[in-house]
Image (cartoon, rainbow, N blue to C red):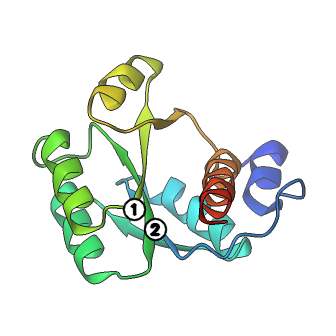
């Protein structure tokens, strides 16, 4: 692990207010990356749940009342991403959906109704910024 990676792993976001946002569901099977993201989210008062495929993700969302965001890629699916997105939005309409992948995946996610996107390789800091910005937008629309 390089110094830069360690800094990303243990740093805090100082330019953003500390979120208390519930849980993020990360659909990924890269255990090293998942552990890094989980630790970073925990430091910023988020819970990170993990699903290694779409079927497990549906189970987590159905039973995880605190999940407010889902980070998904096109590659982790055991069925079509469009089906997963339909199911997720049916289970919880106000869920924040974040697509992740190569830059070329951005348009495919947009066509599926996922308008938040992180280009790989992304850092936990990128995810936190996106989540905090989304929460701020929700607060503004409520008031």
In the picture shown, does residue 63 fall above or below 115? below
**38 and 115: which is toward the camera:** 115
Give left or right: position of 107 versus 136.
Answer: left
Give left or right: position of 116 versus 84.
Answer: right
In the picture shown, does residue 27 fall above or below 116? below
The tag on residue 94 is 1
Question: Residue 42: x and y, percent?
Answer: 65, 75
Give left or right: position of 136 versus 32.
Answer: right
**101 and 99: which is toward the camera:** 99
Task: Report the number of numbered marks.
Answer: 2
| Residue 35 placement: quadrant | bottom right
Q: Mark 2: few, some, or many residues within 10 Å (few <14, many ≥20)?
A: some
In the picture shown, does residue 87 fall above or below 64? above
Q: Secondary structure at mark 2?
A: strand
In the picture shown, does residue 133 fall above or below 142? above
N-term-proximal mark, 1 vs 2: 2
Image point 28% across, 37% down: which residue? 74
Q: Nearer the viewer, mark 1 or mark 2?
A: 1
| Residue 58 placement: quadrant | bottom left
Image point 60% across, 57% down: which residue? 141
Question: Residue 139: x and y, percent?
Answer: 66, 64
Q: Secondary structure at mark 1?
A: loop
Q: Residue furthest front?
A: 143
Q: Residue furthest right?
A: 14
Quadrant that contains the C terminus: bottom right
Contact (Cβ within 8 Å) of mark 1 with mark 2: yes
Residue of label 2? 68
Question: Residue 32: x and y, percent?
Answer: 51, 57
Image point 74% across, 47% down: which residue? 5
Whole-Å distance between the Cαs marked 1 and 2? 8 Å
Image point 26% across, 38% down: which residue? 75
Question: Residue 4: x and y, percent?
Answer: 81, 43
């Amino acid at each position: 692990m390089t110094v830069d990676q360690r800094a990303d792993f243990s740093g805090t976001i100082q330019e953003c207010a500390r979120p208390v946002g519930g849980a993020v569901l990360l659909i990924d099977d890269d255990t090293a990356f998942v552990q890094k993201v989980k630790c970073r989210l925990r430091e910023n008062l988020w819970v990170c749940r993990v699903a290694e495929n779409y079927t497990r993700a549906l189970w987590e969302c159905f039973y995880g009342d605190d999940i407010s965001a889902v980070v998904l890629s096109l590659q982790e699916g055991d069925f079509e991403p469009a089906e997963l997105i339909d199911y997720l939005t049916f289970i919880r309409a106000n869920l924040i959906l974040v697509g992740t992948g190569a830059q070329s995946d951005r348009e495919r996610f947009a066509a599926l109704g996922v308008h938040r996107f992180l280009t790989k390789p992304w850092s936990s800091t990128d995810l936190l910024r996106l989540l905090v910005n989304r929460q701020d937008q929700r607060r503004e629309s409520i008031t």
